[in-house]
Amino acid sequence: MRIVLMGPPGAGKGTQATVVSKALDIPHISTGEIFRANMRAGTELGIEAKKYMDMGEYVPDSVTNKMVAARLAEADAANGFLLDGYPRTAEQVGELELILNSLGTALNKAVEITANTEEVIQRLLKRAEIEGRPDDTEEVIRRRMEVYAEQTAPLTALYADKGLLVQVDGMGSVEEVSARLLAALDD
Ligand code: AP5
């Protein structure tokens, strides 16, 4: 299975990707996590990404696309993957198609997890107390939501046109959402 997972900040992409990745035995590839790992390691990529992430803006496509192309070419992604948080721009949608074409393959599904804005803000503020992610302040969370609404939410229509879009309600417990998501992938 080759899946992309979309949804606003706090919808539960990372949480659900962990479950699906185990259930389907495919790697969970999160662009946000790759950027954060690079920030922790102090790499050039991490220093560049931090400039944007701390403000809730997207990292430029030129940087992100190159990173994803390299990751998808790794051996563990040959038989499937779950991309969490990529693509997020129209240019990234096109780039992903090019990458997969060049690997002789294609996506099976694009999943959008939907969630209520105030609920996801509460989830992220709670996470801020536990993990202290620099982009989990209320101001930056609201900017992340705006950027998602402007740049990423419209992309679901592209996947609907291709017949790949599956929408999953992200409200309720983690277990309830997982059950819905796995059932939708099984369809
Ligand atoms: P990224 O790390 O992907 O962050 P995000 O999209 O803002 O999403 P989150 O991680 O905040 O939320 P999530 O939907 O994964 O939910 P989670 O499971 O964690 O990206 C960060 C930044 O990196 C971007 O802003 C951008 O700058 C950059 N970036 C990344 N990809 C990029 C790209 N392609 N192009 C350009 N820039 C890019 O859950 C959130 C919290 O809620 C957790 O505490 C969790 O325990 C809790 N929770 C989850 N589900 C439930 C539930 N059902 N009930 C109650 N609590 C729940």
Image: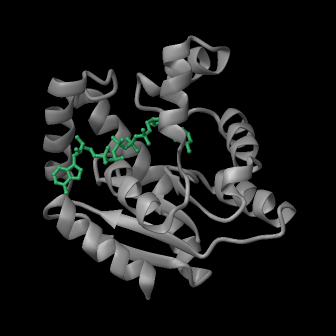
Above or below for 56 versus 54? below
Residue 147 appears in the rendering: yes
Tell me where residue 115 sits by quadrant: bottom left
Q: Residue at x 64, y 71 (%)?
A: 107
Image coords of residue 6 (percent x, y) = 44, 59
**Residue at 63% in and 64% down:** 80
Residue 184 is situated, as x and y percent measured from the top left of the image, at: 38, 80
In this rendering, would 13 be left or right of 127?
right
Relative to 160, residue 40 above or below: above
The x and y percentages for residue 171 are 18, 64
Quadrant observed for ligand 1 in the rendered image: top left
| Residue that extends furthest to the top in the rendered view of this protein | 42
Q: Which one is in front, 110 or 72? A: 72
Query: In the image, 134: left or right of 130?
Result: right
**73 vs 141, nearest the viewer:** 73
* Residue 18 in the image, given as x and y percentages of width and height: 39, 53
Identify which residue is drawn at 14% across, 34% down. 126
